[in-house]
Image: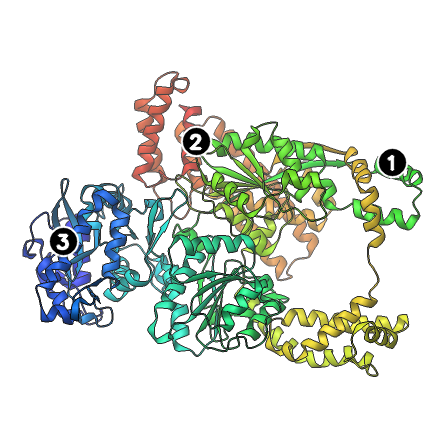
Amino acid sequence: MGFNELNSVENYIIKQLSGVNLNTNEVSEDATSYPKFWKYKSAQELQRSVNEVLLESELKEALIRLNPEITQNPDLADEVIYKLRAILISVHQVGLVRANEEFFKWLQGDKTMPFGENNRHVPVRLIDFEELKNNSFIATSQLRIHHRETKILDIVLFINGIPVVIGEAKTPIRPSVSWLDGAHEVHHIYENAVSQVFVPNILSFATEGKELYYGGIRTPLEFWAPWRLENDEDAIAKRLGLGEIGKELSDLMHPRRLLDILLNFSLFTTNNKKQRIKIIPRFQQYEGANKIVERVKEGKIKKGLIWHFQGSGKSLLMVFAAQKLRREKDLKSPTVIVLVDRTDLDTQITGTFNAADIANVETTDNIKQLQRLLENDTRKIIISMIHKFRDAKPNMNTRDNIIVLVDEAHRTQEGDLGRQMRAALPNAFLFGLTGTPVNKADKNTFWAFGAEEDKGGYMSRYTFHDSIRDNATLPLHFEPRLVDVHVDKETIDKAFEEFKEASALTDEEADALNKKSAKMSAFLKSPERVAKIVKDIAVHFKEKVEPHGFKAMIVTPDRYACVQYKEELDKYFPEEASRVVISTLANDPLEFKQKWAVDKGQQEKIVDEFNDSLGDLKFIIVTAKLLTGFDAPILQTMYLDKSIKDHTLLQAICRTNRLYKDKSFGRIVDYFGVFDDAAKALQFDEESIKTVITNLSELREKLPGAMKDALSHFESVDRTIGGFEGLELAQNAIGDNKKKDAFANDYKFLSNLWESLSPDKVLNSNQEDYKWLSQVFESVRPASDNIGKLLWFSLGAQTTKLIHDNIHVGEVHQLEEFRLDADIIEDIFNNPDPQSVKKLEKILIKRFKKFAGNPKFKSLSERLEDLRNQAEQGLITSIEFIKELCKLAKQTVEAEKELEELLIERTPKAALTELFLELKTDQTPAVVERIVEDIDAIVRIVRFPGWQVTSSGEREVQKSLRKALLKYKLHKDQILFERAYAYIKEYY
């Protein structure tokens, strides 16, 4: 017997679910598996005609079994079946999603019929969600169904005679066939040709025996997802093969799991094109939401941190969790509070809940409204912003079935506002959801939300790597740029001296003004620099972004820079191609406000227009707005010219990583140089998290002493006296500079301690004293920068102009390659500056990676590794290290020259081989030689002299190249395709 999709994959699925081996017609007694709920029946055994969707005899029996009124009068079952048939037929009029939504109301038990006494309406149950054994579970294969045409479905799972899962199996032995082919058949062919059978559908799946992916009805293929096993990280590495697919399948198809997805994790919502769509959860959303629900039901641990990477669907996770918590009978109608800390996040979350038609959702517009809802014991889902807890009274509601879900759990939630929230709701459950935990002592998400019982500080983690592996988000590509800026310091100093004399400034005033004007933004906003960058953006956008149908965001240093960029961009694109989205302040000039102010309604319209692929708007220009909570999958490239760090940086760059048709990565073009910060922001080391938590425990012990020291300066002062009298008494107690300095010293130590510990409950009892000390400190602190500030308002514009006139901008460079030649090596050898040595080390590592397949470079790379180890262990002096490093660098340059001479004469095949070796990853098939052979053979057949200058020739060669790459499943790698095609154009 050979291997095909029927005997290898399809029959394996049936055996895994039901224990029946169709290859040998034996029933397995596998004690290690969970009890086999699914009973196998062949398609011929099912009592149905080819155009019937429901197994009506099974369904009728279930209705009689589960509904007392129908038990008494079994004929009533026919009335229910008639109603269900009508929904199946309606699919042609209302569409598949609306028909599925209507059928789900019946499946979930939300529908009633007048079957009670005196025609009283009673709920009708099609499924028993509590006792699984009260339901029938049938698995079948090769089910023939006729609708518009006849189709044969590989796997169909019925619950109580209702088809709820459709599966498509593909052959495991043809490299050109994958789960994607199966998903394509389900989504594009079966859902249209036999749509009635999908009306009751919970989910569909496809597999070729190596990977298992699933999706809901009308889910585009790029949003199908893999199912992962909880806490099965080792298996992820060895996940190819039927054994692993079997585990995932058994887990996903367990009746308890399917019924949970049916009841609590199926959302019907409206997208921005006003189309009805269905959403089912990805694994991490299902796992995260259920962990929240389980923790609340157990009631022992009152907090937890969900750490899921940006873009992996935290808003939907909150919707699923809130929906399930509200449905849990054991929780006795809980209140679920969803908290955000920015207006744009508020808009996003509210939009997600409203679009999904979740019942009993209340959005609070002000503090009083929120307080009234809590004091009135409102039992709903309340969406609010954290700052609405300001001035909240302690013990506002002491119920223990209040659950708070905090979105982007960092910043304000960890400070005093967070503490006020905890004091107002002392017995509530607090769950933080974040993609960017701030791992620093003064703002530590793990300390604020992570429970000590949770390993690593989090109850659910879904990393950057996980989200890319599962296609939940896209990889990020960085394109660093270097902008040459030459500052003519002598001319600036001279001009400034003249300016100082003309304005009759004192030395102190001149210093203050100088300090203010020398800030980074003055350099960044130099008109010449902005002009050069915008020119680079225009070229880049037209070449790399616009042709693929994507859009871009420009992030500038401040609000005035946004306007500068807009005006410059209008020279290259129509005015309607870009919009500025900024806040205006009360003190802004009237003209600026009139021209650039954007209110909430206008911002929503701009975002809608940006999301419209046919709209004229191509660029959004921002400085702070829309860097968080802005979901626009069409955004592929961010042009970044601003200093941002930590979670803000990570949130900003992840605006580009959302899935979108034909989009394979998000791109950041970095004009400021934040790349290193981005790398750091992605690294969270569990050991350092533990250290921070330990350190915070030590700080807690220091608090009483620090508070005592700060208060000791005011022992004779009655702190109950308010107003100017009380303040004067306090100031007199630290009358001279020596006393003020001593107090300032103690207060600063206390202040740092307070910031680090907030929002710990230990601070509550010291709140009044700390507030009093802070007010006293502010009242005696010197006014730090008033001279500079006042002068800036009157003279700032002239100073800035003076600087801009003397900043000269060269070219904008793309930073891809480091330069490495004999002169540089010699220079490092003679002047061993640590910075240069480090740079040389980095250059060598990059070079060795480039030639990874070449044995000569491999040996050089090993020598470098050995050299670094010796230096780290102190076996060689730093001078010896530099000498050896330079020697290695010289040999690298020589090896490169030899390779260059070899490649001058290289054949087309050799050029392609080098390309594949350069781009090879762990996922690339090992048979590079065969890939190149195939491309070479296929291109030689279709090419003809001068093919490069004819569109038909180019089309033929591109088609052939795609075909060759498809065989090895590399056809989706756009970079590989473009580079390979460029080589073919050059060498064939």
Mark 3, Cα crowd under 10 Å, few <14 / some 14-19 / many 20+, is: many
Q: Mark 1 points at which residue?
A: 495
Tell me, yes or no, if residue 457 can be seen here.
no
* Towards the viewer: 968 or 107: 107
**Of callouts 3 and 1, the N-terminal one:** 3
Q: Which one is closest to the eye, mark 1 or mark 2?
A: 1
Residue type, numbered disc 3: Ser
Q: What element carries label 3?
A: strand
Q: In this view, does 231 lie above or below 527?
A: below
Q: Name the residue under label 3.
A: 141
Rendered image: mark on residue 911: 2
Residue type, numbered disc 2: Ala
Mark 1, Cα crowd under 10 Å, few <14 / some 14-19 / many 20+, is: some
Rendered image: mark on residue 447: none
Q: Is mark 1 on a helix, strand or loop?
A: helix
Q: Is residue 651 left or right of residue 493?
A: left
| Farthest residue, direction bottom | 716
Q: Residue 407: image x %, image y %?
A: 50, 61
